[in-house]
Each structure stands twice: as C-alpha cells, then as structure tokens.
Amino acid sequence: GLNDAKKRAIHLGLFTHEMLHHKFTNFQYANKVAKELKPGERRIFMTIFNVLEDPAIENMAPAFVGGNLLRCLKYTIKRINDLAKSINEYTDPFQQCLNAMIQIGDMYVLKGEFTSPLAKKMFYRISSDMLEVIEEGSSERRVDLALEIFEKLRPIWEDKVTEYDPEELEEFLSVTTGGKGISDGSGAGKDLDPEEMADLCDLSKGAQRHVTFKKLEELSEEEKESYEKTREEEEEEILESEEPKGASGIPG
C-alpha cells in the first residue's frame, strides 16, 4: 500500500543496510566463533548476533553514507518498527525477549509489555550489554559481546535446541523474527576507533537509549508526543527529498 516514493525509499534503505553489513560486519570472525558451537546453538547465536549487529552498523552509517541513502535507511527502520507486533503478542519467553531487543535496536522504544517474567528478567539482564554492542567500534569485539549475551540468554533458548529438529528450529526462528533474514559474507569488517565514532557516527540518540533502557514502559505523554513528532518529521523529509537515483550520498 505504499506510494512510489516510499517504495523507492524502502528499496534503498534495505540496500544501504546490506551494504553496511559488508562494510562493517566481521563475518570471518563471527563464522569462526559459530563453528565452535553445536549446530542448533550455532543458529541461535547467529540470530542473536544479527539482532545486535543491525543497530550497531546502522549507528555507524553516517561514517560511510549520507544524503538520501541515510534518510532512506532511517525511514526503512521506522517502517519495519511500525509493522512490528507488540511483544505481548508472543507467549514464548525467548520470542518476547528477542523481539524486545529488535525493537530497542530499531527505534529505542518497546511496543507492548512483557507478560513473561523470565523474558523481562533476561532482557534487563542483557540491556546494558546490548547498548555496549551498539556503540562498539571494533567488529571483532562486537562478536565477542554477542557471544556473552548468547550465553546469558541460554535459559530461554536452550530448550529449543534440545526439543526442535533443524527444520522446526528454523521455522521457530523465522516466526520469532518476523522472517528477518541473517546477513552473511566473508569480509573481516572495518573497525572505527572511539575518536572516529565520536566524530562521524550518529550517537546523538545515545542519551535517548539510556533513558529508554531505564523506563521502557514509563514514557510520559510529553515524551510520547515528542517521539511521534520526530518520526513524522523524518517521514516528511524522505518524501520531500530528491529522487533516490540521483542522490546516492556515497562518498567518492
């Protein structure tokens, strides 16, 4: 149901996201770490790693792209978040926790409430670790942090590895992530040192992240209005921007 301008924005946003993976994600090291795990665990780890890596590389996007590509990326993230289900629509603790991670990584605001005490406990246990991943410039360090989070979340995913065969596990994860795929590649990823991160990356939302992690379900009416206004302004900027085909924003 999107108009042509929004469709073009989504296409370029998805293209930009995958390009960021090839620029910044350390596929070589992630695959090396995954190979040390059992097959079912490997699939769970790569899912968790991708959920964590997505907001990290999007955070670094301004260091690599600008102009309409960057605007389209932000619009695509917003659109995906708009379509996401509330976490309370999932009953499984792992599904609730993983979708909370996806939503916080996308827009820093949680949709719905935890109905699983275990999912809520696990999410808050790893929330500060997740923030560290998002703001980490070392591609290898992000993999190591993802492995730590993977282990901390073991109580809510381990039963899936023992009870499901490979096809059932694949189906479960597909439903859990809304069909979200896992990016793959062979590159070692580009690192950004702290100074580069501060100078080039979009860390302006960092303060908002900290606030959101502290009170995910307690946004005031004023904060909700500000949040919605910002989203509307970003969408208007996309629709008023020049045609994507003439404004890639890729530096020479």
Image (cartoon, rainbow, N blue to C red):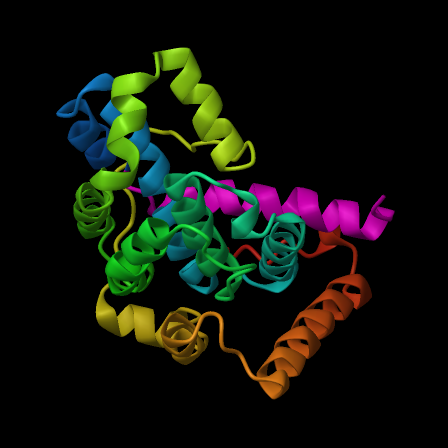
Relative to 93, residue 133 above or below: below
Q: Residue at x 24, y 26 (%)?
A: 41
Residue 120 place in picture, x, y as percent: 36, 56
Q: Residue at x 32, y 75 (%)?
A: 198
Residue at the outermost bottom position: 222
Relative to 176, residue 222 above or below: below
Residue 201 place in picture, x, y as percent: 40, 69
Query: Is 91 included in the stretch rendered in magenta?
Result: no
Q: Is residue 10 left or right of residue 175?
A: right
Residue 189 place in picture, x, y as percent: 29, 44
- Work out whether residue 231 or residue 4 is closer to the camera in this orientation and state it: 231
- Work out whether residue 14 or residue 181 is closer to the camera in this orientation and state it: 181
- Work out whether residue 230 or residue 29 is closer to the camera in this orientation and state it: 230
- Work out whether residue 91 or residue 215 is closer to the camera in this orientation and state it: 91
Q: In this view of the protein, can residue 54 be seen by the observer?
A: no
Q: Which residues are magenta?
A: 1-26
